[in-house]
Amino acid sequence: MKNIAVWGFSWVPPFAQGLVRDLRVRWALEEAGLAYESRWIDADERNSEGYRRKHPFGVVPALDTDGETLIESGAIVHAIAEQCEVLMPQDLRTETLAWMFAALNTVEPPLWNLFVIDRLHGDEAWTRLRRPGAVDEAKARLAALSAWLEGREYLLGRFTAADILMATVLRFVRHTDLVAEFTPLDDYLKRCEARPALQAALRDQAAGYLRNTPVAA
Amino acid sequence: MKNIAVWGFSWVPPFAQGLVRDLRVRWALEEAGLAYESRWIDADERNSEGYRRKHPFGVVPALDTDGETLIESGAIVHAIAEQCEVLMPQDLRTETLAWMFAALNTVEPPLWNLFVIDRLHGDEAWTRLRRPGAVDEAKARLAALSAWLEGREYLLGRFTAADILMATVLRFVRHTDLVAEFTPLDDYLKRCEARPALQAALRDQAAGYLRNTPVAA
C-alpha cells in the first residue's frame, strides 16, 4: 500500500470526537507503521455528488491508495491487516475475521443503539421509555464478551485487527459506566487504549478537528 | 470444507421465520454446492454452558466443520466464499469483503432498528414517537443503495457473497413497503430471492421449524 489517504469528517461536536470510524483506520495504519495523509470533508459535502462517487453512502471512512478507493472501516482495516503480520497473524486469519464481524455485527448494534438514544436523541421523550430495555440488551452482550475475555489479554490472546474494531465499539458507551461494571472488559479496553498506535491515531483525528473548529462552536 | 453442520434455532415465531441469520450460511453453502447437516438449539439452550462453549454470545449461526467451530454469519459466509469462485471471484476479493461489511455495518443497522421497533416492540408506546425518524434513516440508506444498484444486476455487477448478506438484510423490512419504493432496489431483491440456492436454503430452515413447532403454537 502506497500513497495512502484517509477520509474523515473535518469536524464533529465534542461528544462524537474520538468516536468517528476513521479512527479505526488511523489506528490500524499506525499499528502497521504505514504513513498516510488525511483528507477532510465537512457534513454538507458528504452528500455531494463528488463525495458520493467516492463513497456510495456518503459516510466516512474511505481510504485512497494508488488511485483506488476502499470503503467500510471493517474492510479497510482488514485490507491493512492482510499486509501486516502483527494485525492478522497467518495462523489466526479466520478467527481474526470472525471477531472483526463479532465486533461490528454482534457487539456494536446494542452499544450503538445506546449511543443513539443518549447522545443523538437524549432530549426526546421516547428515550426515557426505551432506555432501560436498551441498557439490558447492551449489558447482556457486554457480560458475554467479558466472560470471553477472562484470562485473555486480547480477543485472540495476542493483539489483532479484531481488537481495533472491538475497542472502538466499546468506546461508543464511554458516556456510561457499563464497561467499568465488568472488570475483565474494563481492563481489556484500558489495555487497548494504552497502545501508542491508538494514542497517535487519536492525535491525528483531533488535530484535524482543532484546525477545522467552526468559529461559532 | 467437510463434515459441515449449521447451527440454527429449532423454532422461531412466524414473523421471524426466514430471517434468522443461519439462512445466510445455508444460502452460501447451497450456492457453493457444499452438502451440510443442520443442528438445532432451542431458545432456552442458547444460554446454556454447553452452547456458550461453542458460541460465546449464545446466538446463531455457528458452523462446525472437521471439528472446528466458526461463528458470525459474515465470517462464515466469507470462509465459504474463499473456497468458491462463484461467491468471491479472485479479481473482486477486496470489493466483495467491502460490500459484505457495507451490508452488515452500514445498511443493516437502520433496517434492523426498524425490525426491532415494529416486530419486537410494536405494542410499546415509545415506538410511535420513534418510528418516523427511524423510517427516515432507513429510507436515506435505501435510497443510496438503490442509486448504486442502478444499471447493476448485483452489487458488484455479478453475483457474489456480498449479495447474500445484502439481500438477507433487506428482508428485515419485508413487513414494510420501503424496498418497493425504490425500483432498482426492489428489482435487485427479487433477483436475489429468485435464486434457486436461496429457495433451497429457505426450505431447509422451514423444514426444521415445521418439525419443531411447539404443540401450543
Image (tube, coloured by chain):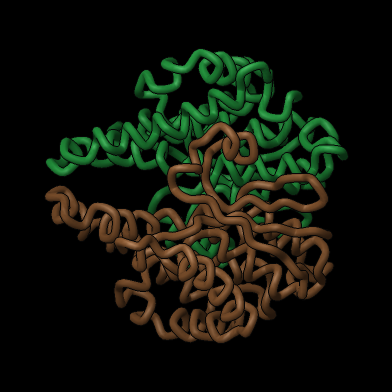
Chain colours: A green, B brown
Residue A98 occupies quadrant: top right
- Relative image position of residue A201 (x, y in whole percent): 62, 28
Task: Estimate the x, y position of residue A158 in percent, counting from the top left.
Answer: 76, 24
In the image, is residue B45 above or below residue B100? Answer: above
**Quadrant holding the N terminus of chain B:** bottom right
Using the image as rendered, state which of residue B154 and residue B84 is in the foreground. Answer: B84
Quarter of the image where the C terminus of chain B is located: bottom left
Name which residue lies at 43% across and 38% down: A11
Would you say B128 lies left or right of B77 here? left
Q: Which residue is painted at 39% across and 34% down in the image?
A: A138
Is residue B170 in sight in this rendering?
no
Residue at 57%, 81% (x, y): give it: B199
Q: Is residue B162 above or below residue A16?
A: below
Task: Say how many tags the image has.
Answer: 0
Q: Position of residue B22 (x, y in %)?
A: 57, 60
Relative to B160, is B22 on the left or the right? left
Depth check: A187 or A133 in front? Answer: A133
Q: Is residue B142 left or right of residue A24?
A: left
Q: In terms of depth relative to the viewer, which is nearer, B111 or A183?
A: A183
Residue A145, given in percent of the width and then of the height, sits at: 54, 29
Q: Residue at x 27, y 37 (%)?
A: A133
Q: In this view of the protein, can residue B163 be seen by the observer?
A: yes
